Image (cartoon, rainbow, N blue to C red):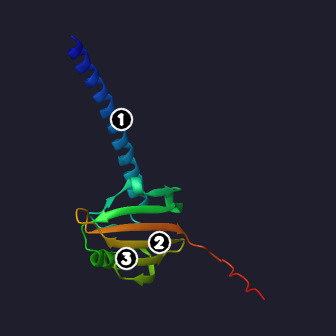
Amino acid sequence: MKKIIFIIVLLILSGCATTDNLGDLSKRFEEIKKIETLLFNQMPLPKDARISPDKSLILGEGDNWAGRIELSSSMEPLEASAFFTTEYPKHNWQLISSTKAKLSILVFTSNTRTLTLEITEGGPLAAKSMIVMTVAPKVQNQASPDSRK
């Protein structure tokens, strides 16, 4: 009898754990959808890109959002760099700086925002490239600091 009660208690506890995990998965799915909605038509991603919601942070909504998005891709880092330098100008982003090395950095600007892309190789068991996108409002009419006399 004690064994049956113990098994029932274990089943109930595992059911609660599963419900919590489903809640976590649902929350992550919602976070991914929010990120994808913000990026849609503004900032194309490689078709196989996977967003890491737990390593991403979005502040704001609509066209005024800023933040950091981490994603992975099966593209090689140079192929990913080529994708961004080809596709982003089609969406009104201008490439202003490009460094291609073990860590490639691409900097784009639009009318209202700045985008920095950091592209590195993935790990041996991970995707071929890891991409970090940092988006911030473009600083307008910033006065340069006065030189000290």
Kindly state the secondary structure of the residue where label 3 is placed. loop
Q: Secondary structure at mark 1?
A: helix
- Mark number displayed over residue 122: none
**Do the residues bearing badges 2 and 3 touch, measured as CB atoms within 8 Å?**
no
Q: Amino acid at mark 1?
A: Asp
Residue 57 or 65: which is nearer the viewer?
57
- Dividing the image into 4 quarters, which one contains the C terminus? bottom right
34 lies above or below 79: above
Question: Mark 2–mark 1 contact, CB under 8 Å?
Answer: no
Left or right, 114 with reference to 17: right
Residue type, numbered disc 3: Leu
How many C-alpha atoms fall within 10 Å of the one at disc 2: few (<14), some, or many (≥20)? many
Residue 25 image-quadrant placement: top left
Q: Dot 2 corresponds to which residue?
A: 115
Q: Secondary structure at mark 2?
A: strand
Q: Which residue is mark 1?
A: 20
The residue mark sitting in front, 3 or 1, is: 3
In the rendering, at what x and y percent does residue 107 appear? 45, 77
* Mark 3 crowd level (few <14, some 14–19, many ≥20, 10 Å Cα): few
**Is there any visible trace of residue 17 in the rendered image?**
yes
Tell me how far mark 3 sits from mark 1, CA to CA: 38 Å
Tag 3 residue = 103
